[in-house]
Image (cartoon, rainbow, N blue to C red):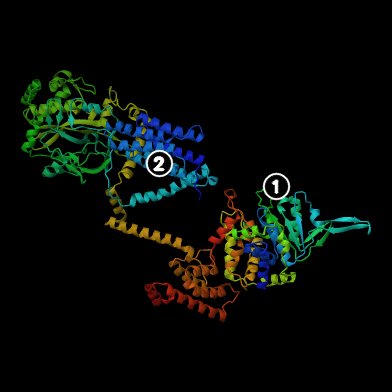
Amino acid sequence: MQEKIQTAVDEIGTVLLGKERQIRLAICCLIAGGHLLIEDLPGMGKTTLAHALARVFGLAFNRIQFTSDLLPADILGVSIFDQGTSGFSFHPGPIFSQLILADEINRTTPKTQSALLEAMEEGQVSVEGATRPLPSPFFVIATQNPVSLAGTFPLPESQLDRFLMRIGIGYPDPKAERELLERGSDADRGAAVQQMLSVDDLIAMREQAGKVGLSPLLLDYLQRIVAYTRENEVFHFGLSPRGSIAVVRAARTWAYMEGRAHAVPEDVQAILPAVVEHRLRASTDAQGRTGAALVNRLLAEVDVF
Amino acid sequence: MEVQTQIPRLTLWWLLAALFLVITPHLFRLPLWISLLIIACVVWRILIFAGRAAFPNKALKMLIVFLSIPLTIAQYRSLGAGLDAAVCLLIMGTAFKLLEMRKRRDMLIVVSLCYVLSMVGFIYSQTILASIHALITFTVITGALISLQRENARSSFTGNAQLAIRLVAQSIPLTIVLFILVPRVAPLWTMPVPVSSNKTGVTDEMSPGNISNLSRSAELAFRVSFDATTPIHEELYWRGLVLDYFDGRAWRRSASAFQTYAMMERFQRPEQGVRNGTPVSYDIILEPTQQTWIYALPLAQLNVSDVIQDRNFTLHKEKPVTQRFRYQVQSYLNYDIDVELASTLEARALQLPEQELNPRSKQLAAQFRQEAPEDRAYALRVLRLFREEPFFYTLTPPALGEASIDEFLFSSRQGFCEHYASSFVYLMRAAGIPARVVVGYQGGEVNPFEGYTMVYQYNAHAWAEVWLEGEGWVRFDPTGAVAPERISEGAQSVLANQPGFLEDSRFSMMRFRNTQWLNSLRLRLDAMDYAWNRWVVSYDEDMQLQFLETLFGEKARERLYLVLGVAISIFFVIAAYFLLRGRKQKQYDEATKFYLRLTDDLAAQGIVRQRGEGPIDFCARVGKEKPELAEAMADITTIYVQLNYAGKLGEGQKHELLFARLRQSIRELRLTLNSPWRRLVLRAWPGQL
């Protein structure tokens, strides 16, 4: 199964050059059954990655471009009077799909954001009194520009918490950029990605990952990390239990992807930045210490043993 | 940590407050232009902060520095004082530093300078007030330091003040313990003395007018505390110097007497004094006089290393008294000295000026001698003259001409103690009786709160000693014949209403002694100052030893070193325990214990495992840095990860097996890592392997 994952990683790597780590994290997030937030500047390949992920798993996906005038009904769907049946019939919105690509999620109003985020948490939507289940599996891959840019509605902490991981992509290295320039096409190449895994594979892998062993020593380490965020005064607030569960879930999946039947501290360290960065804030944020700096402290200062 | 380049407002105010406190006591002593210069610097600094003035440019700064140094030296050269000039330059330097204080580093320099300056103040004054001032100053400087070190966001005035107060308060008990216990080592340098202070007190020359001058001053001369009861006022003759050479006007020490300490030390003869009865024990704290002689009641006996008693039974110190000097004396008030008078002494005690200026006095002496051929009777006859004829005791006697004795005895008849002592001794010598003048202090005021005696400059006095056959030197005080209450009650009761008394101490509280509450306040303040001097300022090596002996008994110093040594060791052991506890306290499982021993050895080889570095990452790094260890390390890491992270193996057989393998591999690797010597130790002590 690990080889299959590697082929999927390589396949996405053909369109997102030199970003294997980010790709693996994204796949890890999907196997772990979590939603993914990709945050970076415009033009870094956020949408390409999201698109490629959907293709490689062969998931039915819808893309929603979030704008400031988007309304909840535009996502969830509306009931329209049908003259043929003389009744209202529900026309499902784009959310009824296995994978939603929510592009530039922070450009829409909080009202619309919360409609999507509710669906993410509950796995179902309530429209006009009727509760409708969403397909399974159900993933949201959202992209956003860094919140400091103008014309955005930053997601509050409570909603950021719903994403299992937040990853950035970063500038390509010179070699990858050269290759990119030589190709010279600006079309969305995510569509060129071939399907490598199936939904069944995904479910099987998730099941396998859940069986990855956690030793007492590793749990001690995890608890030390959590305790550190709660006790040290540079943290505005500590990691919530939901956050620590997320770390465990991601660490297990990562260990599974690495081909281990048990998680080691390195697994935790590999996924820690992506899983907790967006859940932490420094008590003096004015000093420019973002979540990244805090995670670096966690990695450097918490004893492994 | 980024370096802050802007000076925060709060910090600047703290610093200025500290500087203000540090410099204030010096301001009054400094020349006016320097004080003004310093104030100008501070004002300029505030203007810079308010944005109304610029920092001075380099040329201006150079100009200020190069102008002020020679000016200061010129100012102080006339006084010949190195210390005052140095202190002045230090203060100016601190003030100038304000003008180029841009960064944190500069402020740290100013803070350090403030600490030094607050200590410099003690050169000039060691009173309680100075100490309280220093304590407050210290707190404020510490506040400035805290405000400088704290991040802006967490810095608040009350927060900094509280922390500073807490720090200083915590340091006080430690300071007291150190003050009491730390061995007093003699300083490696000699303490420079501010020369601006003049010689005070009784001088070694007595001419008409110079003792009455002293009565203008209410300054303290010394304080005495008697162990038992205080002798009556009439007994309190504090001998200073014996003046036995008369040149017709002034009395001096005779040139043939040993006047230097070295000579006295070399040629000192066995004492001729006979001490009778039980002595009076007391303890004197002498204010600085800048002179070498010190005062005591006759007949003194004291054991101070650098004080010597000369042939005249006066006391001399090796070096001038430049700081408060404390000494303990036992005096035998009932004494006989020089019952056998040596011929040299006798010659000195009969000396009269070669040129005869006072013929009438000579005649008078001859006339009295006929009336009373016996020596003692003659002396009493002279005293009767003073008592029965209209002689007056006054602070402001008319000036005397060439024939001072004749003029005083026959025309003016107004005089202060020096006139009476002088003419009395003259009359004695004229009749062939050995006599000499003694100067010192007479009397003293008892402080009712603490029971010690205060002797002021206005207690300065001169009297006579006459040698009588079979009795030795006997004290005669002709002033007592004129103004008995001067001897029985003190100068202040006689002179209080005289013009000129305490004229130089116009604002002294002494002048208000008739206002009862003020007088009681004066006495209380003096008592406090005395206690401070007695127990704190004069706490020296001898006192420390005494105190330690009461604590530890004999061999106090050795025991103290032992106790100190043990205490310091205990402190370090406790500190080490708390510092190392972080590592020791943690309970590791068996496998990790072995693994950490390996990482310790690797750390000794230069590959230090970081706190947050997992075993697999560490293994990769070791492999990269020392490829020869890669294989063994990978092996160990695999087993270790198997043991500790691969599911819940528990205590089963497989676990035991793996553990044994891990132990074996780690031992093998460690043996290759260690030096041959340590390898030997490890083999001999397999528990450590």
Amino acid tagged 2: Cys
Q: Position of residue B133 (x, y in %)?
A: 40, 39
The furthest residue to the top: B411
Q: In the image, is A43 to the left or to the right of A128?
A: left
Q: Which one is nearer the viewer's eye here, A189 or A242?
A: A189
- Disc marking residue B140: none
| Residue B391 position within the rendered picture, expressed as x and y whole percent measured from the top left | 18, 21
Q: Is residue A139 visible?
A: yes
Given residues A242 and B253, the one toward you in this image is A242
What is the spatial separation of the Cα atoms under label 2 and label 1, in whole angstroms?
54 Å
Which residue was labeled with disc 2? B114
Q: Which residue is mark 1?
A: A151
Kind of residue sitting beneath label 1: Gly
Give the quadrant of residue A74: bottom right
Please tell me how crowded label 1 is: few (under 14), some (14-19), or many (20+) other residues with Cα within 10 Å. Answer: few
SS assignment at label 2: helix
Left or right: B668 in relation to A143: left
> Residue at 27% across / 25% down in the picture?
B495
The residue shown at (17%, 30%) is B205
- Indicate the position of residue B295 as horizontal and vertical percent values: 22, 38
- Answer with left or right where residue B138 lies relative to residue B487: right
| Marked residue chain, label 1 | A
Image quarter in which the C terminus of chain B is found: bottom left
Q: Position of residue A9 (x, y in %)?
A: 66, 67
Q: SS for tag 1?
A: loop
Q: In the rendered picture of this protein, how many numbered marks are placed on residues? A: 2
